[in-house]
Structures are given as structure tokens and as C-alpha cells.
Amino acid sequence: MKVSLLDDLRRQNPIVFNISNFVTVQDVANGINAIGASPIMSEEVDEADEMVQMSQAVCLNLGAFTTPQVHQIKVTGQLANQYHKPLVVDPVAVGAVKYRAQVAAELFQAFQPDVLRGNAGEIAALAGINWQAKGIDAGEGAADLVTIAETCAKKQKCTVILSGPTDVITDGTRTVQVINGTTLFQTHVGSGDMLSSIVAAFCAIEDDYFEAAQTACLVFAAIGQRVAQADPQMGAGTFIIKLMDALQQTTVAQIEAVAVYE
């Protein structure tokens, strides 16, 4: 993996335009900023065109939306395609709530994501594979996670990240699994949303979105793992504070020293 992309990201400081959700918007903005990119957030559709044009990547989060926000998400996704900006979508809870699944299906008729990032339940739903999702959590099922991710990538015609204890990243042909991580990610609601926007930041500087996605996952997972291993007694509150510090300070060499993937 091209972990050196982290240095490129910090040097280039790409602008990432986010439609986030109110639960995690501050975590997402701070995470993007800490790792070395520049976040902009918006809830106004009338400024979407200008926002997309000034950005180097776009991330759309479906975590908490109203009908007007669905319209904004649709318009922003279409503009990202129009201006050829990499588009990352986080399809929160589409496997648990029928309305969310319906909205996602309609949105994907209107625009084409370049990367989808979700947990097993979300990616299984978008792949058309039976899985018992549990709200925003992954839930459980019998299908193989690699098969789920690859099926989704082929169906949705994009790179897919299936996040979990092991992250599966695939474009339907190439597949990588990132083994690094920590269970403390599960204690912080904003971790997945933060990763989605960090993936967008890497897509802003790397035209091969599969390469960008796998590198972003490795960087995020390895940094979280290093933070957790430094203090085995750490709780959820301390973890997120130290994670922000580490996103800013961790070097490429430190990530490469702990990286585990296959």
C-alpha cells in the first residue's frame, strides 16, 4: 500500500466538501483537519455548486436527513459527477431501515458514487444479500464478508469499503483486507463517519480510488491501534482525544511499522 500518500495529503491539503449528519459533524470536520486536509461543511443546496467546484473531493453521509436534505444530497452528488470530483458515500443504516434503503436506491439512480463505505449490514443491503442489520451497527449474517463486499462493488460499479474488525476493500476485481484496528473505534459513534471523509481526502490526491481507499483504511486503523496500545486502560472519551492528536502527529514510518494487511 502507498502509505506515503499520507505525506502527499498533508502537503497538498485538499479541500473535502461534506454533507455530514448532526450527530458527528464536529468529529468529521476535526478528523479531516487533524490528518492534514481541509473540511468544508454545508446544509444549503443553493451553495452546492460553488462548494463542489472549490473542493477536491465530496463525501455524502446518509446518517440523519430530512426530505430537504435528501434533495441537497442528490444535487450535490450530481454536481460531483458533473465536475468529476471523487464522490464517497456513507450509507448509514440502509440495512436496518426500509426508508433509508429506498432513499439510497433513488440517490444512486441520480448519481454514481466512486466509493461506498459502510459496515457489513449496510454493504450487504446494497449488494442485495440477506443480512440482519442492527440499527447503525453491523448486525450478523451467514455470508462471507469478502463475497458481500465484492458483490456490492460489482453491483454498484464502484470501490467498496466494508468496515469492521477487519476492513475489506474491493473494486470487484482487486481485494485487500486491512487487519489493523482497535475495538475502541466501536465505542465512538463518529469513527465510521470520520473514516468516510478521510477516504474522500485520500481520493482527492490519488486517482486510483481503490488505492486511495485501502490506504485511508490502513492509515486510520493503524493510527487507532497505536493509540489504543499505548494505554490498555484507555476509555472511549480519552481515545477520541488521543486519536485526534495521533491523526495529526503519526508519521508514515510509524504506520508502516505496524501495518498488517493481505
Image (tube, rainbow, N blue to C red):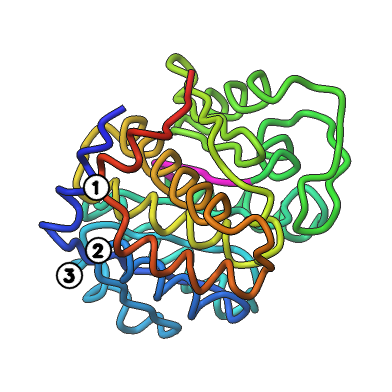
Q: Mark 2 points at which residue?
A: 36
Tell which circle, 2 or 3, labels the residue nearer the N-terminal end.
2
Quadrant of the frame with the N terminus: top left
Residue range in magenta is: 113-118
Classify mark 1: helix, strand or loop: helix
* Amino acid at dot 2: Gly
Question: From what the image shows, is residue 191 above or below residue 259?
Answer: below
Q: Name the residue under label 1.
A: 6
Question: From what the image shows, is residue 115 above or below residue 67?
Answer: above
Number of other residues with Cα within 10 Å of mark 1, as a class: few under 14, some 14 to 19, many 20 or more: many
Find the distance from the CA under tag 3 to the CA under tag 1: 21 Å
Examine the image and state in which quarter residue 39 appears: bottom left
| Label pair 2/3, CB-CB below 8 angstroms | no
Q: In this view, does 24 lie to the left or right of 59?
A: right
| Label pair 1/2, CB-CB below 8 angstroms | yes
Q: Mark 3 points at which residue?
A: 54
Number of other residues with Cα within 10 Å of mark 2, as a class: few under 14, some 14 to 19, many 20 or more: many
> Residue 250 appears at what percent x and percent y?
32, 54
